[in-house]
Amino acid sequence: MLKIAAAFGVCKIVSPSFQKPLSLGITFSPQTQRKKERETMVALCVSRSDDVVIKSLNDKRLYRVIELENGLCALLVHDPEIYPDGVPDESGTVEYSENDVGEEEEEDDDDDDDDEEEEDDEEGEGEGEEEENSEGEEEKGKGGASSQTKKAAAAMCVAMGSFSDPAEAQGLAHFLEHMLFMGSEEFRDENEYDSYLSKHGGSSNAYTEAEHTCYHFEVKREFLKGALRRFSQFFVSPLMKSEAMEREVLAVDSEFNQVLQNDACRLQQLQCHTSGPGHPFNRFSWGNKKSLVDAMEKGLNLREHILKLYRDYYHGGLMKLVVIGGEPLDVLESWVTELFAKVRKGPQTKPKFQVEGPIWKAGLLYRLEAVKDVNILDLTWTLPCLHQEYLKKSEDYLAHLLGHEGKGSLHQLLKARGLATSLSAGVGDEGMHRSSLAYIFGMSIHLTDYGLEKVLSLSCLVYLEDFYFSALQCYSPHFLEDLEELLIFDIIGFVYQYLKLLRDVPPQQWIFKELQDIGNMEFRFAEEQPQDDYAAELAGLSLLSLAGIYLFVVCTTENLLVFPAENVIYCDYVYKIWDEKAIKRLLQFFTPENMRIDVVSKPSVKSQDLQCEPWFGSSYIEEAIPPSLIEIWRDPPEVDVSLHMPSKNEFVPSDFSIRADNLDHDPVNPSFPRCIIDEPLMKFWYKLDSTFKVPRANTYFRIYLKEGYASVKSFLMTELFILLLKDELNEIIYQASVAKLETSISLVSDKLELKVYGFNEKLPALLSKVLMIAKSFLPSDGRFKVIKEDLERNLKNANMKPLSHSSYLRLQVLCKSFYDVEEKQCVLSDLSLADLNAFIPELRSQLYIEALCHGNLFQEEAINLSNIIRNNLSVQPLPVNMRHEEHVICLPPSANLVRDVNVKNKSETNSVVELYFQIEPEVGLDSIKLKALADLFDEIVQEPLFNQLRTKEQLGYVVECSPRVTYRINGFCFVVQSSKYNPVYLLGRIENFINGLEELLGGLDDASFENYKSGLMAKLLEKDHSLQYETNRLWNQITDKRYMFDSSLKEAEKLKSIHKSDVINWFRTYLHQSSPKCRRLTIRLWGCNIDSKEVETRPDSEQVITDITAFKVSSEYYPSLC
């Protein structure tokens, strides 16, 4: 399904401001008392259960469900791997590190000893994203095989979201979410919470949904209680001071501006705007300056409204908490009762919304003018709320069939006729799609221009059904003037033919049983997520499949009727009750009268009937659907013969034996991968998993292709070949993915990257099928036209997002071999099928393969996989000197380069500045120390940067810095995106911040510096969450040709000897402009509302790149490292 991550206000809060508070004259709950009240607070837990939650046999965590007297329900999770060597004595733990304690905390020093705590990226953006991913940028973390630490985490969900926004102040729930980060009575500095997390290897996030708001964090294990103490104050005594509100409303506005040009968000807001007046869907949930500040200018007291929202809904009865720690459950319970007992008591009744009539008017089609070059047909049907039907999953049964991509499916029919490139179906994960009011079942179909050309051809008169022509002739004598509409209606006709098939053929229990087996298999061998993601999912943030209501119903008598506590984890996997009648009942809602049609595309002509959605300013047309068509769709006279039910899935495994339990077959099991084949054709790495012990394996291959990157033409033909191969393999790949055996095929410069991963029993069979086709595949004319058109559209849409565009421009300067989007577009238009078919045999004639097999396979099984490759790709080896090498520019001493470019989207108001400092190549003994210094500098600077430029100066929503590793050339980057300020001003503010960094670094006391080091070491030594996390970490070392599989361990070890003076010297050497080793490249991307003539006044030291080709020809480059 089309998932709109930004919908209803995704909000990443990293560090609010240091500003001192202003009192609002509001009385909140007092500060929590400590030791003297501890016994009383424990008594405030009115119920607890340790044996309720159903969990996987592989899940070693312990769960306890408790309810406090104030109505707050909590799920406590003891993770034994957080302290694998045992929990330290309570007396030796840390709650406040030196300089973490504010004035108001000092009074508690005497009674801390006994209760201190124990130790602890939207859819692809095309060209820019592809190149960015090839940089090999790495996370700080995911260390080596002997890494043993895990972080602690917590999440809180409040059963109130944007549906509760007052009509006169839309976006208020999202604004309230922002304000809770801005200080509390106990911790009055605005950035205290985020500063504490930053110093201790943590991070935080928050999210406002339709019917709930969720907050979560992760932190180094021994600082969980200190983080919980600060976190709890969000829900006890937030300050919400007036001056912070004035600043933070600008942050909400900046956040909205990030999605202003997003077609998916525009469509969702159009659906909200055109819903019935007074319906909870009829909201502007993001909020912006206009919806909030204009309300104040009209006399609304925004402060009183936000406080009322807080008082009405932020109470224990509507709060569900998850805490994951390494401490015993009794300790975690004592912390929760101590810290959250002062949350105000309230009724355990969620907000209810009165609704009369349907969400949308029937019989209408909406045409939304797209920002990008897309052609998407979206169909939606309103279903009743299915919260109580989660054991049946009838909607998932229908989604499985309507979204199927195998033989007999709707997808295959549309693809065979050249009408569509993709189809997805199901109930979305967003809260609006899974609300207490209704479930929204959607189908999204990406249409082709090629299909429209077929409609225009004379032969289409045979292809199109006669009854459609009859229907449209009755509706309009000029129906042929709108052939695009005819194509859309014809596709919808096929949808209703398939729905007729589902009504005529009774629901199949064997299909439900197949889904049930797959769900049980996934649950039994579920892989871990990062701790904060897991906490957030349990508390409702991730909205996986059950719309985040997992814990809204836990521990309350009334809501146990909806979701009993035992299924808080299992509910997402369980297919427990086969109910044929329930499926038939749901099918009754799939009628044309209950269908909404949205078409998102670039308009071919301007209509006189354009309307404007007020918040995004999107143009749209509302049209009535011909009644005669609705009549035909209601009961199609026939079902196309190519449509039928799917066959049984051959990839569902039955062997779940664990190889590591029988190491007699493979007695040598080192911590790191070892090379078991090293030949001219192939280098093959292998590691048996003995850590996670799940029946999964990950097999990754990089296949170097002959002349795949020799010229822009050869690169485009290679890309077309890969895309057409994926298209050809789609049916096989889809069937395997349903059985949780995934395949990824992508292009990285001249290399085909093939990944086959998941449950391992059928992995060899899938690999054989994929390679059998790949070795001899040649595309057909029809698919060539469709895929070429799709590639042309992707190139048109590349770099529409400013942040992706700025990264693209940076890499365009840095990388010697870089094919520009515009150049690709010119060459692609002239490419023919004959060109491609002549090129493919040469492309496959010589290969070199580097591979990794990691997981639940013995060495002989891995060697068998290598034989499958060798047997199917029996060609000559590709010599080293014929493999593409990437070279990165070596910026000259004291370089101060500037590149000015305008945004691609002429309606994009956001500008971006990306200030890049080139450091050194990743070679020699000092490379680990250089990386450690860059990572530590980033750890120290991130929060002050955000606090100054985002929270205090409100430059824009995106303010960040991070190390950049471009083909193993180290660098460091500062990025600001703003819809308000021009790039020259933004650059000046970044430089001003950098100029003050030496003072900031010098002013760090030893304790704070050690905290930052300790936090970074925790990230570096963090245990891999799953087999796939570990595989990806190992694979990065192979593809970057480092082969240093314990690099994070080495970096953590190096950190121990790093002093504050080392960081200051690193800063002076590489980031201070007086140093010859300070080499800068500034990308200034100018928004549409900014006059770029301001660049005429520039410092003499700046060198402006006006001719990128001439500049690169005259530049020097580092030797290739990967």
Image (cartoon, rainbow, N blue to C red):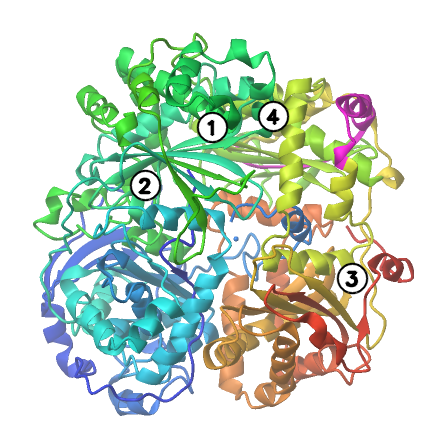
Q: Earlier in the sequence, mark 2 or mark 1?
A: 1
Report the residue marked by disc 3.
923
Q: Badges 4 and 3: C-beta atoms under 8 Å apart?
A: no
Q: Position of residue 931 (x, y in %)?
A: 67, 67
Find out whether residue 834 is within the magenta segment.
yes
Q: Position of residue 953 (x, y in %)?
A: 50, 81
Q: Earlier in the sequence, mark 1 or mark 3?
A: 1
Q: Residue 545 — which label?
A: 2
Question: How dense is the environment of label 4, judged by Cα within 10 Å: few (below 14), some, or many (20 and up)?
Answer: many
Identified by mark 1, the residue type is Glu
Q: Position of residue 78 (x, y in %)?
A: 30, 57
Identified by mark 4, the residue type is Tyr
Question: How dense is the environment of label 2, judged by Cα within 10 Å: few (below 14), some, or many (20 and up)?
Answer: some
Identified by mark 2, the residue type is Ser
Q: Earlier in the sequence, mark 3 or mark 2?
A: 2
Horizontal relation, residue 439 to residue 789: left or right: left
Q: Earlier in the sequence, mark 4 or mark 2?
A: 4
Report the residue marked by disc 4.
450
Question: How dense is the environment of label 1, judged by Cα within 10 Å: few (below 14), some, or many (20 and up)?
Answer: some
**Vertical arrangement, residue 47 with respect to residue 945, above or below:** above
Q: Nearer the viewer, mark 1 or mark 3?
A: 1
**Of residues 88 and 725, the one drawn nearer to the viewer in this rendering:** 725
Q: Earlier in the sequence, mark 4 or mark 3?
A: 4
Horizontal relation, residue 897 to residue 1067: left or right: right
Q: Badges 1 and 3: C-beta atoms under 8 Å apart?
A: no
Q: Badges 1 and 4: C-beta atoms under 8 Å apart?
A: no
Spatial CA distance of label 2 from label 1 is 34 Å
Placement of the N terminus among the 4 image quadrants:
top left
Spatial CA distance of label 3 from label 2 is 46 Å
Q: Residue 485 — which label?
A: 1
Looking at the rendering, the stretch of residues picked out in magenta corresponds to 828-856
**Vertical arrangement, residue 348 with respect to residue 41, above or below:** above
